Image (spheres, rainbow, N blue to C red):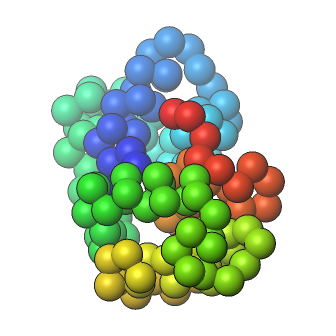
Amino acid sequence: MGKSEPEKRRRVAAMLTNGAGCTEISTQISIGRQTVYRWKDTLASGGIEALLAIPNRGRPNKLSDDQVNALRQALTHHPSDFNLTGRSWSLKLVSRLIIKLFDVGYGKSSVSRLLPELGVCLNSARRPRDR
């Protein structure tokens, strides 16, 4: 989904190596500052291998990488293109779109955690950002 945990850890490691601060990294990669500090300590004590060996946390994504990419593309269109009623995308409409396209149920809170990884912000741009 979007960037995988190992990809994020590699990016954090590169940014730390290049002198970026934890707050800056947290903002740019959209992860918690405490996570960046933990990863920084792991990197310092065990190197990149130790950082990449950290098990992923949380429930695995229900969508495959291909489905995530298809969803990202779909969100560049208007909801009416998918026979959904609404002037713009909302958590509820994205949830309905996921069900319609992939027959996978996502609640609004799960959709809200998925959207940043897609580069989508519903309360401003409404379109995926270039990554």
119 w.r.t. 51: above or below:
below
Q: Position of residue 53 (x, y in %)?
A: 20, 45
Q: Residue furthest top?
A: 18
Which residue is drawn at the image coordinates 73% and 68% (left, top)?
88
Q: Is residue 59 visible?
A: no
Q: Position of residue 104 (x, y in %)?
A: 34, 83
Which residue is drawn at the image coordinates 57% and 53% (left, top)?
76
| Image quadrant assignment for residue 113 | bottom right
Which residue is drawn at the image coordinates 56% and 34% (left, top)?
130
Which residue is drawn at the image coordinates 61% and 40% (left, top)?
129
| Image quadrant assignment for residue 49 | top left
Front-lying residue, 101 or 6: 101
Q: Quadrant of the N terminus?
A: bottom left
**Left or right side of 15 for 33:** right
**Left or right side of 89 for 107:** left
Q: Position of residue 99 (x, y in %)?
A: 41, 84
Front-lying residue, 119 or 73: 73
Front-lying residue, 41 or 130: 130
Front-lying residue, 77 or 117: 77
Q: Position of residue 34 (x, y in %)?
A: 57, 50
124 w.r.t. 47: above or below:
below
**Left or right side of 127 for 82:** left
Q: Is residue 76 visible?
A: yes
